[in-house]
Amino acid sequence: MKHSDYAATQRAAGRRSAAVKAATYFGLTVWALVVLFPFYWMVLTSVKSYGAYNSEHTPVFFTLSPTLENYRQAFTAVPLAGYLLNTLIFSVITTAAMVVVSTLAAYAFARLEFRGRSLVFGIFLSMMMIPTELVVITNFVTITNLDLRNSFPGLILPSITSVFYIYLLKESFEQVPDELYRAARVDGTSDLKYLWKVMIPICRPTLVTVTILKLIECWNSYVWPRLITDDQAYFLVSNGIQQIREEGFGRENVPAMMAAVVVISVPLIVLFLAFRGKIMEGASRGGIKG
């Protein structure tokens, strides 16, 4: 092939590569706008006055007179601060307990040798096939019989374990070389000390991922808190939304409702943006074995 022909081929390949890259970025930009638009609309609506919003015959995608009155109403018309505090308590305690339980269970399945380990773990994984509704009914009956309705223990106890997170941690623990465990055992290191000093530091990305995902799951929890609590003192933000809509602002005051939703959503958005790298790293580490 002549040098001129080779150069022309390279230029053509470069143009095709640039066109593909441009089309890819254009598609990603359009998709990002589609995904982010509901958040923009939520924030925009929350800074519109009640009168301005209801006077719009067609949607207006900007406002020249934003107001924070809706946010004041969100905290004064309903006990939104109390809902946020309840959710924070529930999320932190539940996540901490779940991480401890799941870490110990995953370590047992990954490192401890006992008869029937594979069979027990297979049965354990099969629990993921049980419909959530059946588990909710069983948990409701158990918590009611223990007289734990309208209490934080009643909210927390059914959520302190997760088959999926135990599986994810087990896969991560199994990537740590067996030689480290044998050497530690020869030195007289106990299993708990080995877990704390070796496994947890090495598998920290997966643990961070599990922690963040569980926090998000707890913050968004709706069915169980709605079912087990009818006392407003124990409402979380998720089931408090319905209380806000019905008894706080009224169904017509959409701007105030959107202000409350923004306040509730901001902690999760900040958490995800701050740890998105750790989430991706932990998920990839737990999903790749070798």
Image (spheres, rainbow, N blue to C red):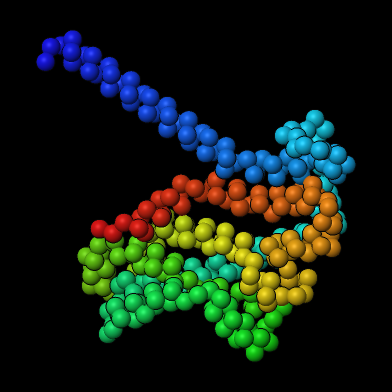
The single residue placed furthest to the bottom in the displayed view is 145
Q: Nearer the viewer, residue 113 or 252?
A: 252
Q: Residue at x 32, y 24 (%)?
A: 16
The percent coordinates of residue 5 (x first, y second) are 18, 13
Where residue 172 sits, quadrant-wise, is bottom left
Confirm whether residue 91 shows in the render: no
Q: Quadrant of the C terminus?
A: bottom left
Q: Residue at x 62, y 86 (%)?
A: 141
Q: Residue at x 58, y 69 (%)?
A: 94
Q: Residue at x 43, y 50 (%)?
A: 280
Q: Quadrant of the N terminus?
A: top left
Q: Nearer the viewer, residue 105 or 231?
A: 231
The percent coordinates of residue 158 (x first, y second) are 57, 77
Q: Nearer the viewer, residue 244 or 134?
A: 134
The single residue placed furthest to the front in the displayed view is 57
The single residue placed furthest to the left in the displayed view is 1
Whether residue 204 is situated above or below residue 96 in the rendered picture: above
Left or right: where 67 falls relative to 240: right
Where residue 25 sits, quadrant-wise, is top left
The percent coordinates of residue 27 (x first, y second) are 47, 34
Question: In the rendered picture of this protein, how many numbered marks are placed on residues?
Answer: 0
